[in-house]
Image: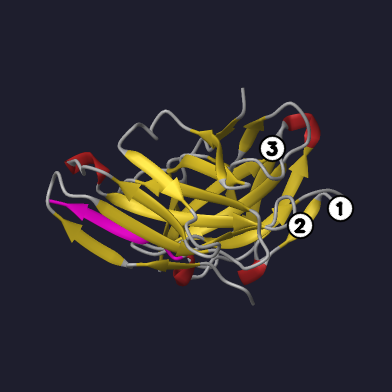
Amino acid sequence: EPEVTQTPSHQVTQMGQEVILRCVPISNHLYFYWYRQILGQKVEFLVSFYNNEISEKSEIFDDQFSVERPDGSNFTLKIRSTKLEDSAMYFCASVGRPGELFFGEGSRLTVL
Amino acid sequence: AQSVTQPDIHITVSEGASLELRCNYSYGATPYLFWYVQSPGQGLQLLLKYFSGDTLVQGIKGFEAEFKRSQSSFNLRKPSVHWSDAAEYFCALSGGYNKLIFGAGTRLAVHP
């Protein structure tokens, strides 16, 4: 079965540092997403990406966040200057057909 | 506004008992509906999904869910719960290629 892969599985960083989370979506998918889950809370939508541009973003996705698909395969989420409250699990997802959404296993970010 | 409500934050059942987890949604049309399960520190596993057609949907691990348009509900059921079912359960909806909107989750505890 096709799968979405995410790296790293866990990253620990100091507050103020830049972090890049990487995702390899399923190869023929065109819609890509990042979600965030703070420990013990629900999964929240961050951003959707289609045709090499952001199609929708939530209010969480402020100027310190950015996404790109630099080489046609990787889909990255960059947090420019991490804060303590950015500590969370970050999930990447991709969609092929409507409603057929595949999640990665997540990247746990710990900001100290 | 699009939303998903899971009224029960925490449910405890005895092993072997039946289970029903409630999910209500608000959406302008018939959405794509999903149930996910998450064990602590783990990713999101898709249990089942509803797109159209038969309103009773069978999923993995013996779970089923019934879509009731008149009640805007998509409740998850299992006839006999196993200790390994203890986890967090999330109901979610999307409009197809749109973002997934998650409920707050229901934490299931299973007593031996």
Q: CA distance from mark 3 to mark 2?
A: 13 Å
Callout 3 environment at 10 Å: few (<14), some (14 to 19), or many (20+)? Answer: many
Numbered range of the magenta stretch = A105-112
The residue at 62%/68% (across/down) is A27
Amino acid identity at mark 3:
Ser
Image-quadrant location for residue A83: top left
Q: Main secondary structure of the magenta part?
A: strand
Identify the mark at residue B81; answer none if there is no mark. Answer: none
Q: Nearer the viewer, residue A83 or B53?
A: A83
Amino acid identity at mark 1:
Asp
State the quadrant of the N terminus of chain A.
bottom right
Q: Residue B29 location, x and y as percent?
A: 78, 30
Instruction: Give yes or no for contact between labels 2 and 1 (Cβ–Cβ under 8 Å).
Output: yes
Q: Secondary structure at mark 3?
A: strand
Q: Is A112 displayed left or right of B33 in the figure?
A: left
Give above or below for B41 relative to B30: below
Q: Is B35 displayed left or right of B73 in the figure?
A: left
Q: Residue B43 location, x and y as percent?
A: 44, 63
Instruction: Give yes or no for contact between labels 3 and 2 (Cβ–Cβ under 8 Å).
Output: no
Q: CA distance from mark 1 to mark 3?
A: 15 Å
Identify the mark at residue B73; answer none if there is no mark. Answer: 3
Residue B86 visible to the viewer: no
Q: Nearer the viewer, residue A75 or A83?
A: A75
Q: Which residue is mark 1?
A: B54
The residue at 46%/50% (across/down) is A68
Instruction: Give yes or no for contact between labels 1 and 3 (Cβ–Cβ under 8 Å).
Output: no
Q: Which residue is mark 2?
A: B57
Callout 1 environment at 10 Å: few (<14), some (14 to 19), or many (20+)? Answer: few
